[in-house]
């Protein structure tokens, strides 16, 4: 803003003169500013009223159009301690029988008390090895393995548990770990199991090892160990399987071990550790057996495969033909000369075309080639008849077979016992000493289970939704106990639904009539800043309230909507050939002369204890509901639909109004913009003429200054 120094020469109040000269422009601008402010207030008033109408339209009217709003049911339980039951409109009337077999619970592990090896307290920053937990210990949350690393702290371990899918915390005050499932029911159950021997020790040191839950049933962990041990659950590896077998044997089946048994296991392990040298010895024996078997097979083949020639050579027999042409075998006695002649004949005829001789030679040669140590038939015969060799073989075979059996037995024993009873030293030692941590408390995650009318249902949360009933199980029934659930029409709820609708209508129609019938604000106009400076805050508030309350006075849009709603509420509807109105059910407006002007459109229900006007009258509405709820339901559906349709049309989008708006919001917004443009226009004129007049007065002051200077100079020359 320009700083002006005026009237120094002329002595005139230039600012006041200029303001008077431009006052016409200023008043024009103020006129449009007030109109703009008033338009803004009116838009706000309409927004508030429209919000009330739209709220009634979407909440009360919308639901009252639906039959489900009147098909209200109520259910009661013969023993309210067992269950809480609510009924929806689709529930079937009648009585049903129910048992509660078990309640839903979340899986929860309250760990046993823990301490460091030196007896001091554990904190979040305590390293796990200070609690006696070995690095490399492996535990699993469900199937997610956690390996204890070097230097891992309690807080880091808690973080690992959370990442594996459970809620976990360490309470330093009580020195316990707390682990629980993220969801309730059987699906939320979790397991904390050992994947190796040190893992079991870790769980015990952490206080997170429990055999039985608080109901004395196997914990989820023990069930998993049993499954892994018997093969119904796949093991991660053989070590995990043997650990599971040991835990089941020791902690579930209560197997105990004597000192002799433990010593035997240790001795077995010592033998197992010598397996390499023993296996080498075994393999050597196997080689002897294999060599003998190869040779024996050749001998057997030789004996079984040679034809007539073989029989002659070995048994001294030959085949002859008698006088009748029949072949038969007869014993012959060959001399050494005969024997030599046969050998020579075979050698001489090696490769002959005689098929029989060729075949015999081929078989013999095959034998000789396979038996590399025997050059001819004599050598082969000598081996078979060598008693010393036979004896050596028999002894070797017996030794090897005995050792093989012992080896197999040892291997099988170790498979079943080594990892389970000795490598898993925590299992054996704690079982022998009876020292495992039993201070942990375990709650198993389970679904709630009920039996309704003979059918079994389960729920992870304990709440069941069955054929229109919502049942929350709260207590297990006795062995032979059944509770009754009785469902019937809820006449009181239907009455309350209608009463609530009438109440919401009354609130709205009273607000509409109050705004429509408001007193005139007369000449009250929004205040300028200068006018506000002359008034107190209280005076300003009263002044503006007077204007704001009157903004919708005699508004045709508001009046038409109010009249239409009253007309619909006075309408009659035909149902099953009979005509019904609100008056049929004892619902009507108050007396014209006894009611306040803004409450003449409000409705009253005869017999309503909360309405002083009609509380003493007979309750026709409740009587009608008890007598024929279908008629009452259909009447109010038709009434609501009629009003809903009318308001839908009134709130339709148009060129001057937005969707779901009962007033011309677009038009009013446009008018507000017009006022703003006019204010800006007259502000520009005001600024222009202010500047214009200030320049004129500035020129006058400048001229007077020059005149004054000239006069002073002349006076000086004249000696005045």
Image (cartoon, rainbow, N blue to C red):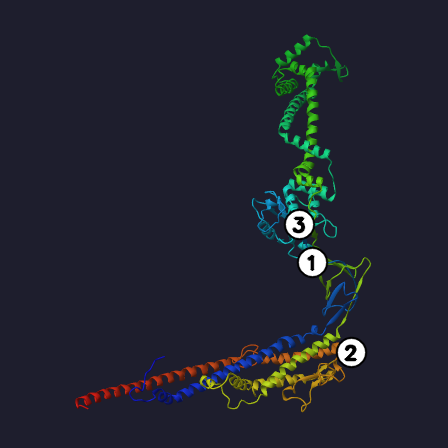
Marks 1 and 2: which is nearer the front? Answer: 1
Q: Please, is residue 296 above or below residue 622 in the view?
A: above
Going 60% across and 84% down the picture, which residue do you hit?
Answer: 512
Cα separation between marks 2 and 3? 67 Å
Question: Which mark identifies residue 211?
Answer: none
Between 500 and 106, the residue placed more toward the observer is 106
Question: Which mark identifies residue 113?
Answer: 3
Query: Which residue, given by chain and number where applicable, does mark 2 sit on?
Result: 627
Quadrant position of residue 100 = bottom right
Q: Which residue of the protein is positioned furthest toward the right in this rendering?
A: 480
Q: Is residue 621 visible?
A: yes
Q: Please, is residue 716 above or below residue 360 in the view?
A: below
Assess disc 2: are there few (<14), some (14-19) or many (≥20) residues with their C-alpha within 10 Å of its C-alpha. few
Instruction: Specify which label sits upstream in the sequence, 1 or 2.
Output: 1
Cα separation between marks 1 and 2? 42 Å
Residue 718 at what x, y percent from top left? 17, 91
Q: Secondary structure at mark 1?
A: loop
Assess disc 3: are there few (<14), some (14-19) or many (≥20) residues with their C-alpha within 10 Å of its C-alpha. some
Query: Which residue, given by chain and number where applicable, does mark 1 sit on?
Result: 460
Split into 4 quadrants, where in the image is the N terminus?
bottom left
Q: Secondary structure at mark 2?
A: helix
On screen, residue 380 versus residue 720, left or right, reads right
Marks 3 and 1: which is nearer the front? Answer: 3
Quadrant position of residue 406 = top right
């Amino acid at each position: 803003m320009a700083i002006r120094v005026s009237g120094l020469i002329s002595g005139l109040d230039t600012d006041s003169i200029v303001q008077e000269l431009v006052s016409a422009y200023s008043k024009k601008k103020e006129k449009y500013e007030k109109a703009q402010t008033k338009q803004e207030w009116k838009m706000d008033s309409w927004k508030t009223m429209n919000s009330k109408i739209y709220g009634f339209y979407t909440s009360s009217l919308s639901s009252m159009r639906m039959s489900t709003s009147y098909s209200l049911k109520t259910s009661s339980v013969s023993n309210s301690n067992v269950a809480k039951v609510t009924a929806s409109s689709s529930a079937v009337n009648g009585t049903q029988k129910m048992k509660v077999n078990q309640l839903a619970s979340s899986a929860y592990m309250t760990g046993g008390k823990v301490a460091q090896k030196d007896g001091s307290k554990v904190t979040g920053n305590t390293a796990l090895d200070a609690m006696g937990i070995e690095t490399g210990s492996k535990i699993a949350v469900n199937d997610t393995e956690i390996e204890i690393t070097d230097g891992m702290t309690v807080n880091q371990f808690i973080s690992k548990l959370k990442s594996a899918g459970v809620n976990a915390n360490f309470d330093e005050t009580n020195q316990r770990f707390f682990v629980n499932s993220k969801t309730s029911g059987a699906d939320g159950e979790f397991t904390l199991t050992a994947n190796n021997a040190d893992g079991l020790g870790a769980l015990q040191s952490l206080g997170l090892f429990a055999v039985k839950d608080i109901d004395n049933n196997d914990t989820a962990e023990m069930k998993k160990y049993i499954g892994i041990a018997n093969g119904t659950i796949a093991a991660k590896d053989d070590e995990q399987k043997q650990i599971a077998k040991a835990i089941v044997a020791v902690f579930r089946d209560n197997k105990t071990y004597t000192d002799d048994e433990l010593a035997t296991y240790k001795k077995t392990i010592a033998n197992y550790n010598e397996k390499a040298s023993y296996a080498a010895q075994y393999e050597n024996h196997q080689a002897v057996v294999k060599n003998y078997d190869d040779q024996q097979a050749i001998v057997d083949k030789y004996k079984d495969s040679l034809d007539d020639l073989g029989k002659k050579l070995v048994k001294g027999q030959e085949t002859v033909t008698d006088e009748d042409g029949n072949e038969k075998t007869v014993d012959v006695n060959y001399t050494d000369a005969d024997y030599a002649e046969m050998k020579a004949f075979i050698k001489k005829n090696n490769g002959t075309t005689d098929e029989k001789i060729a075949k015999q030679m081929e078989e013999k040669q095959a034998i000789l080639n396979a038996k590399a140590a025997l050059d001819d038939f004599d050598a082969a015969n000598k081996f078979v008849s060598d008693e010393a060799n036979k004896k050596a073989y028999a002894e070797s075979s017996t030794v090897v077979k005995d050792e093989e059996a012992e080896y197999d037995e040892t291997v099988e024993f170790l498979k079943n016992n080594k990892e389970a009873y000795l490598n898993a030293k925590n299992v054996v030692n704690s079982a022998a000493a009876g020292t495992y941590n039993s201070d942990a408390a375990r709650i198993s995650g389970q679904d709630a289970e009920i039996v309704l009318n003979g059918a079994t249902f389960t729920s992870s949360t304990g709440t069941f939704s069955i054929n229109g009933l919502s049942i929350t199980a709260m207590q297990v029934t006795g062995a032979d106990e059944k509770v009754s659930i009785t469902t019937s029409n809820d006449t009181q709820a239907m009455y309350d639904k209608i009463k609530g609708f009438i109440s919401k209508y009354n609130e709205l129609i009273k607000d509409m009539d109050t705004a429509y019938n408001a007193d005139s604000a007369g000449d009250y106009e929004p205040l300028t800043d200068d006018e506000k400076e002359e008034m107190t805050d209280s005076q300003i508030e009263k002044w503006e309230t007077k204007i704001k309350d009157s903004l919708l006075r005699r508004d045709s849009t508001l009046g038409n909507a109010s009249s239409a709603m009253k007309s619909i509420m006075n309408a009659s509807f035909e149902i099953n050939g009979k005509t019904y109105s609100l008056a049929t059910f004892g619902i009507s407006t108050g007396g014209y002369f006894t009611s306040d002007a803004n409450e003449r459109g409000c409705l009253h229900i005869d017999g309503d204890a909360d309405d002083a006007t009609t509380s003493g009258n007979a309750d026709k509405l409740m009587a009608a509901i008890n007598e024929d709820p279908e008629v009452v339901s259909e009447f109010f559906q038709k009434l609501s639909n009629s009003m809903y349709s009318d308001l839908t049309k009134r709130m339709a989008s148009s060129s001057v109004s937005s969707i779901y708006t009962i007033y011309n919001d677009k038009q009013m917004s446009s008018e507000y913009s017009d006022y703003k443009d006019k204010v800006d226009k007259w502000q520009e004129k005001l600024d222009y003429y202010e500047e214009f007049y200030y320049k004129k007065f500035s020129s006058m002051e400048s001229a007077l200054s020059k005149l004054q200077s000239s006069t002073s100079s002349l006076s000086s020359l004249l000696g005045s």
